[in-house]
Amino acid sequence: MMIFSEILVLFLALVIAITLVLMLRKLFFGRQTKIQIDKKVNSRELFEPVGSEPITEKIHEENISAKKYEEEILNQDLEEMDIATENPKMLTLHIQNNEDSKFSYDGIKEFLGSNEIKFSDEGGWFKIFLEEADSFLFVNGLNPGKFIPEEDLLETPIMTLIYAFKNKANSVSAFSKMIEITQFIAEHFESEILDSDRNILTKQMVDHYSQIAEEFDLNNLT
């Protein structure tokens, strides 16, 4: 009888021990999983007001906004590129008289008109026409860039020639013709031809300008 009682006590102790182990396991390990899930749910409830859109939708909208912003920046860059295209590169030369002689408004008009040079007076500055409807500008080399008869601004020591590159034009041929006319004007007025930096124009610089014109034409064949 004594042995049976001891076995019964051991059995009850084992059952109690197993029960405690299961309870503790459920208490700690099972609760930890639930706490982690609750944290996710609570975080969402904390940062999302009632009736607000889900986080995934918000992230999607933010991505769309960022994409639209990038497109706007890209479009802005393209617009700036278009502006640069509308204002093409230019080749500039100058013709300078000595200190005792100046170009006069009437003298230039008379010279251009008497030498079969096609030109138009644009109101104090000139447009000289080349072949195939191309042209370059012939202007006062000092501010304000033109002659103003009403203000008695009729003379200047330096004139400037400006050729703006144009798409589908023969820029090399146009520049060559511009050089020819420039030399003709300089010889008549006994003047010096200067480059864009107002240094004496050299053959090396002429070749350099011709190369620039050729590169422009090659890049704008269509």
Image (cartoon, rainbow, N blue to C red):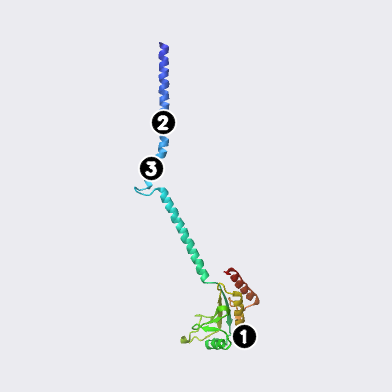
The residues tagged by marks 2 and 1 sit, at their Cα atoms, a distance apart of 108 Å
Q: Above or below — where is 169 with respect to 11? A: below
Whichever of callouts 3 and 1 sits on the residue coming sooner in the sequence is 3
Q: Which residue is drawn at 43% across and 30% down?
A: 25
Q: Where is residue 158 in the image (x, y as percent from the top left)?
A: 56, 82
Q: Which residue lies furthest to the left in this view?
A: 50
Q: Above or below — where is 146 with respect to 25? A: below
Whichever of callouts 3 and 2 sits on the residue coming sooner in the sequence is 2
- Classify 10 Å Cα crowding around label 2: few (below 14), some (14-19), many (20 and above): few
Image side of residue 58 versus residue 192, left or right: left
Q: What element carries label 2?
A: helix
Can I make out residue 140 in this image?
no
- Classify 10 Å Cα crowding around label 1: few (below 14), some (14-19), many (20 and above): few
- Name the residue type under label 2: Lys
Q: Do the residues labelled 3 and 2 touch (CB within 8 Å)?
A: no
Q: Which residue is drawn at 41% across and 51% down?
A: 58
Q: Position of residue 203 (x, y in %)?
A: 65, 77
The circle drawn on residue 42 is 3
Q: Position of residue 48 (x, y in %)?
A: 37, 47
The circle drawn on residue 26 is 2
Q: Residue at x 41, y 39 (%)?
A: 37
Q: What element carries label 1?
A: helix
Reading the image, the residue beneath label 1 is 187
Q: Is mark 3 on a helix, strand or loop?
A: helix
- Name the residue type under label 3: Asn
Q: Are marks 3 and 1 in contact (CB under 8 Å)?
A: no
Quadrant where the C terminus is found in the figure: bottom right
The circle drawn on residue 47 is none
- Classify 10 Å Cα crowding around label 3: few (below 14), some (14-19), many (20 and above): few
Q: Residue furthest top?
A: 1
Whichever of callouts 2 and 1 sits on the residue coming sooner in the sequence is 2
- Name the residue type under label 1: Glu
